Image: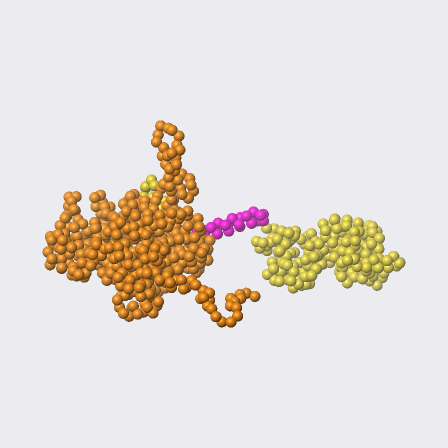
Chain colours: A yellow, B orange
């Protein structure tokens, strides 16, 4: 069901002068809400590079999209559909706590940074994680610790490498090196706090991750990405090897448990005695 | 004292001539059906030999019967725990090869063969697959010591003998054998009944016949594995297990079972034994050496008024108690102590008793001629051609004393009759031999009469069936009830 709010806002936007709104710190807001995924001139990395976006698109559309990306996309907007296709179905989450004025301040900031000579915006400092964070993240990933929102553990769908149990899922993409794909731990945290892909969004909409869980998981996945890569066999070969070993062990166990089972009596008797029949 | 009655049997092995008439009578009557071709509810084995199925006495392989001479008595084949672990496959089930693949011959070929240079032949055809087979074994493949080095030489009971005794037993011109007819023992402590997960097996109250309820049987085949005598068989066609039914339709009409009736050597006796059911467990737990004696102690004297009174209280019919007093089985087993259970160490308390064979066991020969003097014909038991140790394994649970007792008494009767009929034995000597054998001339005469001159009625004392009582059990008493008010409605079940 479409909500009327974005359209009302868009209509209001048309009536407003395109003057920059002061009193809002665009840079601080950008760092807080956008920098997890977006850069300004730093290259597209899981999300579009926003350099020059204010020149390419009209502000009305940008405002409408930022306020509710899902509604715009579902309304069949061709530009939104294009974005969705470019980023493999990953939809931008609606930023929380941003009103129209704040968004306009951010857009102003982006416009000010989009000059030809402007240096890329520096990303926020990477967070520091303790070993406790990593350990907790591992437990959450494997499902040893239950998520506060009762959502499924990551292992159900994703494989992460060293911490995998036998049953790590292959439904979602492998999580090895996910922090590099998603602009570091900050980007991952933002991603986890409001997952943009259709599957994860629908799974975790009703079971959102708590802030401390996001932190722990980011810590764990970051550590996994920086750890030395596994030099073992490919997953399928390891699984086949394990299955073979388990089968052999099973047959051995059967052989031991029923070692004194009844075997043929008459034939061995005859052949042992050297008889022909 | 919990007195119950059992229709028990005595097989007098000294009289068995190994003709297999009993087996054929049984086969024609009961097991000539699809799925039952391989079964021989009654079979006759040559001893020494491995029997049917091959090596059935070796419970290391077959796991039949009970174990535990002291403390708990438990089945060798299964337990509550093992029922679960063996639920898809019982690990101690004999295969068809241990019995034999039944076959017939392609007789039609004799008539339909094309004209050719050779006589047509009737090839053996499997009665299970219908395809031609090479016959490899049969139910009495080692009959009369056939294939001795393979079969007779592997008899588990030979373990009691030294290598030298074995060599002597199988020496040319010294070789000796006797026959062992076997059917279901209708045991007092039946392992098959105890092992059945479906509760399909039961021991009939009135005469102790052990039967398999064909409606309840669920083909677990636990009875096949549990029976140490391997006398429960699985019918592959009906998917139910079957066993000897002691010809109960004949018995209920006052006739002896078919194998008894058909016996050419008249070796079989049937009659009622009264026993004390309260002491069954204690007897089954007796130490190995005392098993035969403990088994015999269960059997009660029907002439004892206290026993008869207790039997009446337990619902044993007066006619059954009367039959017990005339029972030839009681005389052989309890009174004369000549008949012994087969492999009492299986602890199922079998109710078929065997008089151990004496001849040609005790005869001696010089230069190929049998010594015809009494001392030559009926020599010392220790010089028997079949060592007593071997017989003790079969009939004494390893203890040779009851076997020696039974043999000594048989021998004494021979000496006594020799003195009476031939006259080449001094009466005083015969009397002395009788005393040594714990017997008397009156007893010897009675043994002689029941052994040699027995009539049909003396051998088979089958009590009336009292079917009127069975009919009462089968009838719903409410059917006959009249009077009262309103409608009679059965109780409503469920919701």
Residue furthest front as drawn? B483
Looking at the rendered image, the quarter that the C terminus of chain A falls into is: top left
> For the magenta stretch, what is the residue range?
A231-256
Q: Is residue A233 magenta?
A: yes
In the rendering, at what x and y percent does residue B368 appear? Answer: 17, 43
Residue at 58 percent of width and 48 percent of height: A236
- Is B110 situated above or below A84? above
Q: Is residue B384 left or right of residue A97?
A: left
Q: Nearer the viewer, residue B11 or B312?
A: B312
Q: Nearer the viewer, residue A60 or A160?
A: A60
Q: Is residue A85 left or right of residue B95?
A: right
Q: Nearer the viewer, residue B397 or B262?
A: B262
In the rendering, at what x and y percent does residue A82 appear? Answer: 77, 49
Q: Is residue A73 left or right of residue B131?
A: right
- Is B330 situated above or below A232? below
Residue at 75 percent of width and 51 percent of height: A84
Q: Is residue B374 visible?
A: yes
In the rendering, at what x and y percent does residue B255 appear? Answer: 31, 55
Q: Is residue A87 magenta?
A: no
Q: Is residue B395 left or right of residue A31?
A: left
Q: Is residue B349 visible?
A: no
């Amino acid at each position: 069901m479409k909500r009327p709010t974005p359209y009302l806002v868009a209509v209001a936007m048309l009536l407003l002068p395109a003057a920059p709104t002061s009193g809002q710190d665009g840079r601080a807001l950008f760092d807080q809400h956008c920098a997890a995924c977006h850069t300004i001139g730093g290259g597209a990395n899981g999300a579009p590079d926003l350099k020059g976006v204010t020149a390419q698109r009209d502000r009305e559309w940008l405002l409408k999209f930022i306020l509710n990306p899902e509604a715009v996309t579902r309304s069949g907007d061709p530009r939104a559909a294009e974005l969705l296709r470019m980023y493999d179905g990953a939809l931008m989450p609606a930023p929380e706590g941003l009103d129209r004025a704040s968004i306009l301040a951010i857009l102003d900031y982006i416009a000010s940074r989009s000059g030809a000579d402007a240096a890329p915006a520096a990303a926020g400092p990477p967070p520091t994680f303790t070993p406790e964070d990593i350990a907790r993240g591992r437990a959450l990933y494997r499902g040893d610790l239950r998520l506060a929102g009762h959502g499924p553990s990551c292992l159900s769908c994703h494989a992460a490498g060293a911490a995998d149990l036998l049953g790590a899922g292959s439904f979602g993409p492998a999580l090895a090196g996910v922090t590099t794909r998603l602009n570091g731990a900050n980007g991952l945290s933002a991603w986890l706090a409001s997952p943009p892909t259709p599957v994860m969004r629908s799974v975790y909409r009703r079971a959102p991750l708590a802030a401390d869980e996001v932190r722990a998981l980011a810590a764990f996945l970051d550590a996994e990405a920086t750890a030395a890569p596994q030099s073992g066999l490919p997953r399928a070969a390891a699984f086949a090897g394990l299955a073979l070993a388990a089968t052999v062990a099973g047959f051995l166990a059967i052989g031991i448990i029923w070692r004194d089972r009844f075997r043929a009596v008459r034939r061995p008797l005859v052949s042992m005695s050297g008889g022909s029949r | 004292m919990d007195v119950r009655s059992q229709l028990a049997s005595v097989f007098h092995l000294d009289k068995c001539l190994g003709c297999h008439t009993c087996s054929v009578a049984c086969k024609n009557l009961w097991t000539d059906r699809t799925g039952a071709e391989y079964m021989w509810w009654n079979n006759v084995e040559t001893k020494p030999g491995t029997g049917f199925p091959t090596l059935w006495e070796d419970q290391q392989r077959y796991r039949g019967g009970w174990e535990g001479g002291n403390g708990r008595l438990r089945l060798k084949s299964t337990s509550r725990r093992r029922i679960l672990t063996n639920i898809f496959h019982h690990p101690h089930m004999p295969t068809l090869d241990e019995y034999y693949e039944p076959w017939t011959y392609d007789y039609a070929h004799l008539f339909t063969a094309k004209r050719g240079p050779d006589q047509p032949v009737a090839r053996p055809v499997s009665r299970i697959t219908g395809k031609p087979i090479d016959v490899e074994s049969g139910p009495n493949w080692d009959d009369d010591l056939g294939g001795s080095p393979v079969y007779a030489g592997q008899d588990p009971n030979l373990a009691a003998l030294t290598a030298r005794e074995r060599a002597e037993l199988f020496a040319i011109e010294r070789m000796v054998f006797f026959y062992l007819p076997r059917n279901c023992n209708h045991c007092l402590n039946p392992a098959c009944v105890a092992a059945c997960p479906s509760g399909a097996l039961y021991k009939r109250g009135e005469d102790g016949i052990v039967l398999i309820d064909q409606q309840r049987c669920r083909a677990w085949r636990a009875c096949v594995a549990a029976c140490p005598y391997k006398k429960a068989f699985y019918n592959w066609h009906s998917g139910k297990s079957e066993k000897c039914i002691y010809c109960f339709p004949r018995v209920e009409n006052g006739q002896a079972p078919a194998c008894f009736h058909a016996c050419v050597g008249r070796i079989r006796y049937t009659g009622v034994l009264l026993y004390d059911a309260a002491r069954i467990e204690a007897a089954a737990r007796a130490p190995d050496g005392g098993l035969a004696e403990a088994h015999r102690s269960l059997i009660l004297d029907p002439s004892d008024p206290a026993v008869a009174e207790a039997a009446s209280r337990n619902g044993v019919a007066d006619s059954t108690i009367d039959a017990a007093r005339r029972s030839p089985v009681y005389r052989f087993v309890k009174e004369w102590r000549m008949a012994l259970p087969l492999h009492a160490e299986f602890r199922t308390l079998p109710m078929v008793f065997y008089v151990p064979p004496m001849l040609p066991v005790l005869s001696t020969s010089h230069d190929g001629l049998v010594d015809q003097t009494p001392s030559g014909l009926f020599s010392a038991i220790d010089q028997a051609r079949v060592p007593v140790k071997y017989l003790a394994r079969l009939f004494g649970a390893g203890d040779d004393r009851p076997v020696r007792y039974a043999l000594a008494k048989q021998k004494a009767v021979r000496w006594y009759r020799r003195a009476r009929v031939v006259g080449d034995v001094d009466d005083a000597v015969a009397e002395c031999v009788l005393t040594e054998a714990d017997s008397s001339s009156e007893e010897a005469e009675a043994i002689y009469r029941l052994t040699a001159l027995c009539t049909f009625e003396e051998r088979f004392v089958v009590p009336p069936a009292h079917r009127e009582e069975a009919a009462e059990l089968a009838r719903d008493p409410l059917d006959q009830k009249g009077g009262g008010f309103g409608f009679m409605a059965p109780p409503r079940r469920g919701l």
